[in-house]
Image (spheres, rainbow, N blue to C red):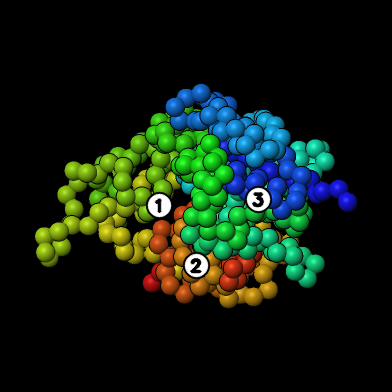
């Protein structure tokens, strides 16, 4: 019987490299595919595509798999980056990694892999797939500190049925140990953070190139104007650093100390930014949220209403009640107020370790 062919996305990072080796060890015929998703100023200090390709090709050579490069830059620009800019222009804060997974890694990449004769695709994400009752479930990784199911919540049955996540059962520490044992050239390479087109570069400077913006008033919750913002697109709810109120006299507490300022609201219609003092200010606490563009992994909204949710990555699951509203909208009511619920980010639902899907946060109502 011929081996099953798996095409794996190899980014040049340690996770996808060890994933490729694990698949080969498990008896699959493995082909590596390096995706180039960004071309603007690609050779700059901030975007390391050339070095990543060298690393991916070097790893493929060491573990003995073929690798090819494929360019999805035009698809990325049309399907991910254009949406990213639209969201920022509208005053929201998008998460392009969610869209990139749905539109590029598990759509354009999957389609390309099938033309290569693949039976399955694989990536170095920390997550698991389980087949149960003739359907496919997305589960959190065993290593909860690295779990990436939040970013994968828009995947559907067809995509999951063709996908392997070799690192789902393995702690990150073991991945590094395997890479060292194999003497992979990227064994000590640090994990990439963020997305290539922004990387480590100054975010405001990057957005300046693509967005129109205009300054406007910066107000406190009691109606004082305390400065001018540089454009609503450049702020996100809950932001503390870089607001530009360093010299603002804060309200003093009884002990003479004063709390930090946080971005709490954006009034897009009036181009006004509101800031409040103190992490626990009521304007930063939400009791409910509304979400749209829902995507459910099972193909339909969850049957149970009592679930858990994350409104941002790296957040602990929080108990909530789900109320579906039509095909693509839903509401969540939280048992405990949630901090800085941000329009444009994803609200992702869980039943234990099972990721059920989610939607984009459209708005929220304050606690109390």
Mark 3: secondary structure = helix
In front: mark 3 or mark 2? 3
- Tell which circle, 2 or 1, labels the residue nearer the N-terminal end: 1
Q: Does residue 328 show up?
A: no
Q: If the image is split into quadrants, where does the C terminus sit? A: bottom left
**Residue 143 appears anywhere in the view:** yes
Question: Which quadrant of the structure image shows residue 17?
Answer: top right
Residue at image position (30%, 60%) is 279
Q: Give whichever of discs 3 and 2 has the lower sequence position.
A: 3
Residue at mark 3 to residue at mark 1: CA–CA distance: 41 Å
Query: Could you tell me if the residues under marks 3 and 1 are in contact, i.e. CB atoms within 8 Å?
Result: no
Kindly identify which residue carries mark 3.
Answer: 22
Mark 3 or mark 1: name the one nearer the start of the chain.
3
- Between disc 3 and disc 1, the foreground one is 3
Pointer 1 local density, CA inside 10 Å: few below 14, some 14–19, many at least 20: many
Q: Which residue is mark 2?
A: 317
Q: Position of residue 177 (x, y in %)?
A: 51, 51
The answer to which of 27 and 161 lies nearer the viewer is 27
């Amino acid at each position: 019987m011929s081996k099953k062919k798996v095409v794996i996305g190899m980014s040049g990072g340690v996770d996808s490299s060890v994933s490729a080796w694990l698949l080969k060890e498990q008896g699959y015929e493995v082909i590596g595919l390096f995706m180039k998703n960004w071309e603007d100023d690609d050779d700059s200090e901030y975007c390391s595509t050339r070095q990543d390709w060298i690393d991916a090709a070097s790893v493929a050579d060491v573990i003995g798999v073929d690798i090819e490069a494929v360019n999805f830059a035009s698809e990325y620009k049309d399907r991910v980056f254009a949406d990213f800019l639209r969201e920022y222009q509208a005053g929201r804060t998008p998460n392009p990694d969610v869209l990139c997974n749905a539109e590029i890694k598990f759509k354009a990449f999957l389609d390309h892999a099938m033309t290569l004769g693949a039976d399955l695709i694989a990536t170095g994400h920390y997550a698991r797939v389980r087949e149960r009752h003739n359907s496919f479930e997305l589960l959190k990784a065993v290593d909860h500190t690295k779990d990436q199911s939040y970013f994968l919540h828009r995947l559907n049955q067809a995509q999951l049925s063709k996908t392997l996540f070799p690192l789902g059962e393995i702690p990150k520490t073991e991945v590094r140990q395997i890479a060292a044992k194999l003497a992979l050239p990227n064994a000590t390479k640090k994990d990439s953070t963020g997305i290539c087109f922004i990387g480590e570069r100054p975010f405001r400077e990057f957005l300046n190139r693509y967005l129109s913006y205009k300054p406007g008033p910066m107000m406190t919750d009691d109606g004082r104007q305390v400065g001018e913002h540089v454009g609503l697109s450049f702020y996100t709810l809950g932001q503390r650093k870089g607001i530009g109120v360093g010299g603002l006299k804060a309200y003093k507490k009884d002990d003479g100390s004063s709390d930090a300022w946080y971005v709490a609201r954006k009034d897009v219609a009036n181009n006004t930014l509101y800031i409040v003092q103190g992490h626990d200010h009521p304007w930063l606490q939400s009791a409910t949220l509304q979400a749209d563009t829902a995507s459910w992994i099972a193909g339909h909204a969850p049957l149970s209403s009592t679930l858990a949710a994350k409104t941002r990555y790296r957040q602990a699951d929080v108990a909530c009640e789900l109320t579906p509203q039509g095909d693509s909208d839903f509401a969540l009511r939280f048992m405990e107020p949630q901090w800085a619920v941000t329009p444009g980010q994803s609200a992702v639902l869980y039943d234990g370790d099972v990721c059920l899907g989610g939607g984009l946060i459209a708005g929220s109502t304050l606690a109390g």
